[in-house]
Amino acid sequence: MSDGNAGLRHATTLQDYLRVAGRRKWTIAQAIVLVPLVAVGFSLHQPKMYRASAEVLLATQNVANQLNGINDPTLSQDADRHAQTQADLARVPAVARQALLLAGLRRSVDDFLKHSSATAKTNADLLELSVTDHRTDVARRLASAYAEAFSHYRAQLDTAPYTNAKRRANAQLRDMAAAQAQKSRAYEALVGKRDQLDQMIALLTRNAVPVQAAEHATQVQPRPVRNGILGLLLGIVIGVGFAFLKEALDTRVRSADEVEERLGLPLLARVPEPPRRLRKRDGLVMLDEPQSPQAETFRLLRTNLEFVRSLNKPRTILVTSALEQEGKSTTTANLAIALARAGRRVALLDLDLRRPFLNRFFDLHGRPGLTQIAVRQADLADVLAPLAFTAYSGGANGATPDENGNGHRANAGELVVIGSGPLPPNPGEFVGTPAIARVLEDLRKRFDVVLIDTPPALQVGDAISLSAQVDALVVVCRMDVVRRPLLNELRRVLDSSPAEKLGFVLAGAESEDGYGYGYGYGASAYHARETAGVT
């Protein structure tokens, strides 16, 4: 169930199979319902057919050879092989033609062979001859005639040498009688030989004897109950097989564990899609609904990010994604606000010089942008007017989301948002210029954290070019956008980046299998505060 990197493969467990079956339950259910219905429907449209059977006893020893003291070569043959030989012998056209003649029916030999069978019974010297027909009486008559015809045919084969010998003996006796030699010893010996041939011919006709005539005929079609059960079993097999085939061809990512395994990065947080009301007006959860359960996910992201930054303390952090529409800009903006609310001095920089998006979240009208600062058309000081964030009151039991575990308020932080400015004609080359490096270095000295929103890493090379000028990077992945081959390619791109890889954020987490426990826990508290009139 893996593709791409061999190093990313993992052993498939029973839980994985059950998870696949759960995801594809409707595919399996459709096969389980439709296949039996088709089988039953097909059965009900079949004409009625009846089968009758007769049995023939097969002799395993040649009595004639025994009387003559001759070793029977058939005794050394395998019993199953001998029985199968007799069954194949019963399928020759001569037997079919004789059976039709005995039954008094005018049908083609091919049609008779198509609707008949010869089967050697297991552990018994019996040959079962069966015939199928639309009428029960015809099926019984043909089956009995089939047994008689095979018995006659087998007798003809076994007695043919002796019959020829008897014919020659009779011719010699007629010649001797014409020569007046009836009283000679040769004549008497030839008569004795002829009588012995008669005896052996009589014995050899008993090598295949009908022992059970066709007395009953059973209906063999339609059989809707049997076909329905077989259809059910086949439907289960087809449904499960088709479900796993669809799973193998489906390149969608199902869980954060799979993203973590393919990227080789730790999960920093799962963030759900913003509410529809905020998306319509380009609102941010951390600004408009800071006490909502969605905002709690960004505080968790902030906490985890601070934890992974505790070693090298990277200040300039690039945020990218594999493709567009993965929630990269929204995640970056909310994270910047969460860090500012925790008392950090944060600079949020829009370095997506192809499709800048941060200006939709913040009122940057009249402010110079990054490109103007880089070409010295404006000073950095002109854009450093911060949005102030202080700890706010309210919340359940008097606590606030920006308080620490001892109930003390966090220090006030600040957030500075720097837009992209006028877009350059060659953004891919512009982001790698010394001017951009100079601006990033100035921001690194002035702020605790510099978050940089960049274009998708797999669509343009801006993010990887910038990664040489920053301390670390964070990847945003959206469950219903990214695919397994894209993750494999993204990992190869990230491996070429010199920046420290802090981890990834799973956006659109509500589409992940099993998602909902943590979110529901926060949502219940939020709804309780709403009921109490606290916002």
Image: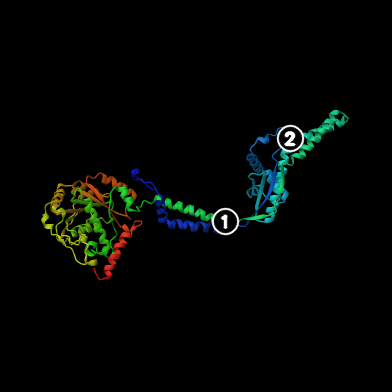
Between disc 1 and disc 2, the foreground one is 2
Could you tell me which residue is drawn at 15 percent across and 47 percent down? 434
Secondary structure of the residue carrying tag 2 is: helix
Question: In the rendered image of this protein, does residue 511 appear above or below residue 534?
Answer: above
* Image coordinates for residue 106, horizontal then vertical, percent: 70, 51
Residue 378 appears in view: no
Left/right placement of residue 17 relative to residue 488 reads right
Q: Residue at x 51, y 54 (%)?
A: 233
Disc 2: which residue:
66
Judged left or right of residue 437, residue 164 is: right
Residue 83 occupies quadrant: top right
Q: Secondary structure at mark 1?
A: helix
* Residue depicted at x 57% and y 58%: 225
Q: Amino acid at mark 1?
A: Arg
| Colour convention of the picture | rainbow
The x and y percentages for residue 194 are: 81, 34
Q: Earlier in the sequence, mark 1 or mark 2?
A: 2
Q: Which residue is labeled 1 in the image?
A: 226
**Spatial separation of the CA atoms under disc 1 and disc 2:** 50 Å
Looking at the picture, how far across and down is residue 526, in whole percent? 27, 65
Q: Nearer the viewer, residue 27 or 19?
A: 19
Q: Quadrant of residue 510?
A: bottom left
Q: Judge the density around disc 1: few (<14), some (14-19), many (≥20) Cα neighbours within 10 Å.
A: few
Q: Nearer the viewer, residue 51 or 519?
A: 519
